[in-house]
Image (cartoon, rainbow, N blue to C red):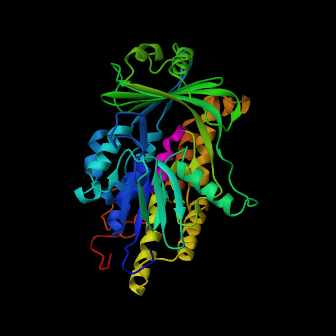
Amino acid sequence: MSSTNTPFKAIIVGGGPVGLAAAHSLHLAGIDFLILERRPAIIEDKGASLIVHPHTLRVFDQFGILDDVLPHGTELNHHLSFTADGHVFAESNRYNLVRENHGHGPVAFHRAELIKTMYNGLPDQAKQKILTNKSLADITTTSDSVTATCADGSTYHGSILIGADGVNSKSRHLIRSLALQEDPTRSWDAENPYTATYQLLFGSFPSPAPAEAGQGYDIQSKNKAIMYFNGPERGWFFLYKRLPAPMSSRTIYTQQDVEDVASEFAEFPLTRTVKVKDVWPRMLGAGLTNLDEGIVKHWSFRRVVLVGDACHKMTTHLGLGFNNGIQDVVVLSNRLRKVVRAAAASGSGGPSAQELKGLFEEYQNMRMSSVCSLEGDVVKSGLETRMHAWHNVWYYLLSRWLSVLKVLEALFITYVMAPEFRKAQVLDYVPREERMKGKISWIYPMKSTAAKEDY
């Protein structure tokens, strides 16, 4: 693929929101790509909600989809904390503080609606590069190319492969096999690199009256907790249950398992007047999974690199997982564009295997460094989950009594969350006028549209 007659091309495995973000970023960078999605359609009405924070809204603006996306989301504006018996013990100002600091509050989206808008925001020529019913079966690499073989026998050739295929990543599994085939004695991540301490039942349902859109709720108890967000048409809940022991193996749950967990939460409140049992008969969709956590040690091998949940996973509390996947794509795309352009200018046609190895290592090192928020976000997300589920007496005291103090909440948002948010990067090759303006500046400002520079 380094031949001057062969243009640089990225194969993206996974057509979810992170894979679509990679498509937007590469298209804007002038880099050819192809998406292989195992599902029969990109847009399916499945899943629960995704929380999008203001630093990701900046990237959506660069994609040119911000004004199309926002009407489909609900900006969060108010939050209440309950005990399982319905007692309200805290009223939070967290969302308003985020808005004041960064110019916009967090926005809750139905996952399928966000995917639809991201897909529709791609130009027609980019949409034609998205293939469905393409389940990855194998990866082979040479010194100058990578080939993806799908379960239907079709093969696709590219310069690199980006694994955006989620927590149970086939891409991650295959590069592990390639690495150990090359050297069985080398140290590598386990087959199942993440550990789950909690089980998660997620789902959506028609918004119960009289719940107001933009409301967030958490319901806390010993070893069980709930997060609930309400939009104008849908509500989304996340029911957390502590597992008997931490586990790493993947578990496939049945519909009966779903019903059994739901029955355990039936009497838990979602709002002051609505309980889980009130919405369960009207569910629009639900799923049960283990809530994996962790960061893998190896994000790349040869011409394959991982992004999103394929290389790091955090609990759904704080809603930071998707936002970190977007940051992976941004950091990787910024570096990839520079290397590809330099190779083209030199006449080599594409970066060498050694150049890509260095680029992938630089990408991982940056994402794992204090320059980025990833490691801290994994820790903070897990901390919030354990606090709400009163994992032990210390988490109980912190969640039920200490964190509810208004002054401590303000200090946490301003001096813990805000410094991490402001680290977020944007595409350095897409000029835009900054729309997310708050009291706290961004470390990586948007390139101005008035700047005289070759983008």
Question: Image height check: is 272 above or below 77?
Answer: above
Q: Is residue 55 left or right of residue 377?
A: left
Q: Magenta span covers which residues? A: 316-328
Question: Image height check: is 289 above or below 50?
Answer: above
Quadrant location of residue 208?
top left
In the rendered image, the residue lying farthest to the bottom is 346
Q: Is residue 62 visible?
A: yes
Q: Is residue 298 left or right of residue 449?
A: right
Residue 386: in magenta span: no
Q: Position of residue 374 (x, y in %)?
A: 57, 54
Is the stretch drawn in magenta largely helix, strand or loop? helix
Residue 326: in magenta span: yes
The C terminus lies in which quarter of the figure?
A: bottom left
Q: Position of residue 452 (x, y in %)?
A: 29, 79
x 39%, y 81%: residue = 4
Q: Position of residue 31 (x, y in %)?
A: 36, 68
Q: Position of residue 145 (x, y in %)?
A: 48, 69
x 56%, y 26%: residue = 253
x 66%, y 47%: residue = 191
